Image: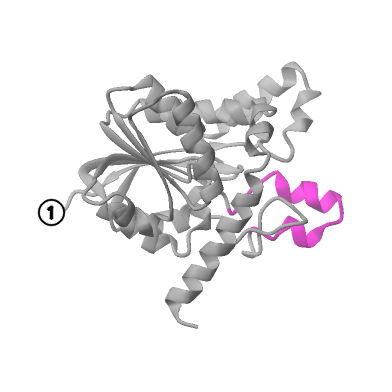
């Protein structure tokens, strides 16, 4: 099988996963205040960056493209997702809000030039690990550089390879393979019943992929102890202690442990050529 066909088959599996996930994705998000809080933190970081034309990679059902386009009606927002079903939901969300500054299309990062020809972006953002499912992270970084303006900024979040609190939790349950599947590159998502082609990323993985074209100017960690998806229910019974875990996370994000949670966020700018 040629590399092109392997890539196509890989992305078909990813798209199929998210098409199925779209059935109740919005409901699960609305029922998860932990996830909403972390998303809002991502947004605040993004809003500190000046921009005029933004691209979201992995937009899902359009929570963020609708949020930003509503807040900044004089700016242009483009969005892609590999799942046609997710793009249907994103377009409907934007249409329901009567937005005329959004442009959503189904495709991968490799398709952006074809989907939005002659368009360059001064902001590219990815929330909750959309780039963990790309076929080749270094190639994805090259493609991103090709449609960035010379002064563009990136706000990228990744699912981490090393998740400090996950390992002992799985070990206590006697699931030794599950405890180390991220580290051994066998992680296939959060579910035991369906798999997604993906790869958790260490800080080194991200640096090697992006450093030829971008400088990392900021980084933060999230969900070291403040869980997001499948363990968010554990926080509901903690009361005020959950707030303590959030504050602990924010403190640890400024320490060498910043990259040991569920997600890491990187603020990048296009590298200046000399």
Kindly identify the residue that appears in the image at 59 percent across and 27 percent down.
36
Kindly identify the residue that appears in the image at 77 percent across and 31 percent down.
233
Q: Position of residue 269 (x, y in %)?
A: 29, 43
Q: Is residue 162 visible?
A: no
Q: Residues within 10 Å of mark 1 (few under 14, many from 20)?
A: few
Q: Position of residue 193 (x, y in %)?
A: 77, 56
Kindly identify the residue that appears in the image at 57 percent across and 33 percent down.
252
Image: 145 above or below 157 = below
Placement of the C terminus among the 4 image quadrants? bottom left
Q: Is residue 262 magenta?
A: no
**Count the marks: how many?**
1
Which image quarter: residue 3? bottom left
Image: 28 above or below 19 = above
Residue at which label 1 appears = 274
Q: Is residue 180 magenta?
A: yes
Segment tinted magenta in the rendering: 161-182
- Report whether 214 appears left or right of 207: left
Depth check, front residue: 123 or 55: 55
Q: Position of residue 27 (x, y in %)?
A: 67, 32
Kindly identify the residue that appears in the image at 25 percent across and 51 percent down.
117
Q: Is residue 190 visible?
A: yes
Q: Secondary structure at mark 1?
A: loop
Q: Position of residue 182 (x, y in %)?
A: 64, 58
Which image quarter: residue 141? bottom left
Depth check, front residue: 80 or 213: 80
């Amino acid at each position: 099988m040629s590399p092109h066909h392997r890539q196509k088959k890989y992305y078909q599996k990813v798209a199929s996963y998210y098409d199925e996930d779209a059935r109740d994705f919005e409901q699960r998000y609305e029922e998860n205040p932990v996830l909403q809080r972390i998303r809002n933190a991502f947004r605040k970081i993004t809003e500190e960056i000046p921009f005029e034309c933004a691209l979201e990679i992995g937009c899902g059902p359009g929570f963020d493209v609708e949020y930003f386009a509503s807040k900044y009606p004089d700016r242009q927002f483009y969005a892609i997702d590999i799942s046609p079903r997710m793009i249907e939901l994103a377009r409907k969300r934007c249409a329901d809000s009567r937005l005329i500054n959004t442009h959503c299309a189904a495709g991968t990062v490799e398709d952006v030039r074809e989907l939005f020809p002659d368009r360059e972006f001064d902001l590219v953002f990815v929330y909750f690990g959309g780039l963990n499912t790309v076929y080749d992270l270094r190639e994805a970084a090259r493609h991103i550089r090709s449609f960035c303006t010379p002064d563009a900024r990136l706000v990228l979040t990744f699912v981490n390879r090393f998740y400090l609190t996950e390992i002992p939790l799985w070990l206590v349950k006697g699931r030794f393979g599950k405890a180390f599947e991220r580290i051994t590159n066998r992680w296939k998502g959060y579910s035991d019943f369906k798999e997604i082609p993906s790869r958790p990323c260490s800080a080194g993985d991200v640096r090697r992929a992006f450093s030829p074209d971008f400088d990392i100017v900021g980084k933060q960690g999230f969900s070291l102890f403040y869980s997001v998806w499948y363990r968010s229910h554990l926080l509901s019974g903690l009361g005020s202690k959950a707030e303590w875990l959030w504050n602990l996370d924010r403190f640890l994000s400024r320490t060498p442990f910043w990259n040991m949670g569920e997600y890491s966020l990187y603020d990048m700018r296009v590298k200046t050529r000399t």
